[in-house]
Image (cartoon, rainbow, N blue to C red):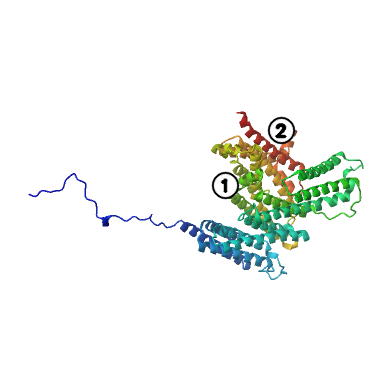
Amino acid sequence: MSTSTTDPIAPPPPAPEYARPAETAPSQTYDEGQAFGRLVGFAGLFGLVLGAVVVVTNTALTPRWISSGWGYLIAAAGVVLMLFHAAKDGEQEVRRLYGMLAALFLVLAVGASVVPGPIFTAAVKKTIGYNLLPWGVAFGALSLVFTIPFVRHETDRRYRDAAVNGMLGVGALLAVGSLVYGLYDPPFLVGPGIAVSLLGLAFLAAYMGQVDTSEGIGFQVAFLLGALGAGVAAWAFARSAFPPVLVEGPNALRAATGEWDWWKVTGRGIVVLVFAGLAAAAWRAKSLPVWLRGVITAAAVASAGVFVVAAVRANVLTTSPAPYLVPTGVILMGLGLTYLAVALAICSDNQFVTLTRRELASYFLSPVGYLVIGGMAFVEWTGYQEFVGTLQRFASRGASGLPEPIVANYFVALLPVIAILLQVPAITMRLVAEEKRTGSLEVLLTAPVNEWPVVGSKFLATWLFFLLTWVPGGLYLIALRVEGGNPFDYRPLLSFYIALAAQGLAFVGMGLFFSTVTRNQIVAAVLTFVGMVLFLAAYLIREQASPIGLPPLLQTVAGKLSFIHLWQESLSGRLPLRDVLVFASFGLFGLFLSVKVLEARKWN
């Protein structure tokens, strides 16, 4: 029997030194998150190539099994998938490939713009610039949207600077060139000019989004863009208003009987006082540079002087000029004010401008904004396809063309009406209700800002987004070619967008008000939808020959609130300004009520 000398309760001896595991860093990890994105990108590339092949073969040859409309849709879906991949995948090889794709699209844009067209038709005379719309502008837009993710991911300064400076050069060329050429050849603006100007503005905005706009060249570009826009808008206003006023002279202020019309005299006096007030406000604006104050003051004083001279002196001009306001003046003023607004939004640090920029950007930081834009673009594309089909069916019967205005039945249809009934609640329901629910509204109002800038910025940003969603419908029509050499009359389209802008003020003001009275987005959306249904009911009441149970006053009010009727009037070439002012006033009243609802929290 042997005995152990080991103490049973003694601790075990330490392990040998060689048995201890060596200390190591954390295990190496591999990024496998790009696999899904690359699969999406490959699917997008396949869709883009397939859609392009379908469109080309249908254009060059006889119609194929897949129509051109489906080809465009497949290609558009492919571009969206590729953009998703380009935004997510920042690997060097991937971003460089997308950068080369952006350069390729830019080359295609230039080629499509300068190659005589039509390409696949030999029976007609070919002209340079024929394919500027839609191919040149479309390829240019694709170049821009693929350049942006390349610039954001690129780390090599040489390539990044080349891309950024390229956006500046292309944008300046398109923006300045289109406006200058539009002044020289006004018909160019009605169609290609609008699209090219907006594309140039998009390139410049993308450039300013990549550089510092508080100082240096970024600020200078923004300032020059705003100066260009203000100058073009001022020129268009002066060219449209001054010659007719100087030709008419004091006779414009007299009634048909030869006596003074005091309503017209009062209106002329208000115009003069507005320009005088603008001159005084500009001169007292100490925050502006002296030279800018001087330019604005001189322009306002000169404008007031023109109206005063025209009121007291006859035959200042003896030759009546050609009409300029519609469509050239309206287009130039719209583009100029758009340039000015974008420049102010980018480089201004004003409280209201900053809040508006924040609210407008919030639509593109959530899925709701993209869903609304995509849904409206699809609805308008569907309406465009039906509109083109109607034109083709009409031409197949041997008729020369639809009577003007041919756009009368383009927007006034079932789908656009249903779309606007759903669109307005979707874009307004979260404005204040969501901030109330999360408590961010109280945090915002504790800053040195009162209710007016907060609510006004939400109102303006939502109204701009509302107008943006209706832009594709107009762009589809710009690309339309009318057979037989008959020009396309865009004046009803311009009056329609003016009416739609006024109606947007009313719709957004109503939705904003309902969003301020509740913390629940769904409740705000339902209330806004009911309000939109009441606007629709106003049209149904107006269409009735003798509405039962309604007094004449309510019938008149219902007729003024019929937004579909105003669509019909504007698309027929008639724009009743009183109805436009009714909708605009309704929207401003909704803005006023929204501010007062927020101010009422101080009373509790």
Residue 244 locus on image (x, y percent)? 85, 51
Which residue lies under the disc numbered 1? 368
Looking at the rendered structure, the kind of residue marked 1 is Val
Residue 412 locus on image (x, y percent)? 68, 48
Q: Nearer the viewer, residue 291 or 459?
A: 291
Disc 2 residue crowd, few under 14, some 14–19, many 20+, Cα 10 Å: few
Residue 351 locus on image (x, y percent)? 65, 43
Looking at the rendered structure, the kind of residue marked 2 is Leu
Observer able to see residue 296: yes
Considering the numbered disc 1 on the image, is that residue within a helix, a strand or a loop?
Answer: helix
Q: Nearer the viewer, residue 261 or 30?
A: 30
Residue 145 locus on image (x, y percent)? 60, 58
Image quarter of the C terminus:
top right
Q: Which mark is residue 89?
A: none
Q: Where is 588 relative to 326, above or below?
A: above
Q: Nearer the viewer, residue 456 or 512?
A: 456
Q: Of circles 1 and 2, which is in front?
A: 1
Which residue lies under the disc numbered 2? 550
Give how far apart the Cα atoms at labels 1 and 2 are. 40 Å
Q: Is residue 490 left or right of residue 96?
A: right
Q: Residue at coordinates 89% horizontally, 55% vertically from top-left?
A: 319
Q: Is residue 294 left or right of residue 120?
A: right
Disc 1 residue crowd, few under 14, some 14–19, many 20+, Cα 10 Å: some
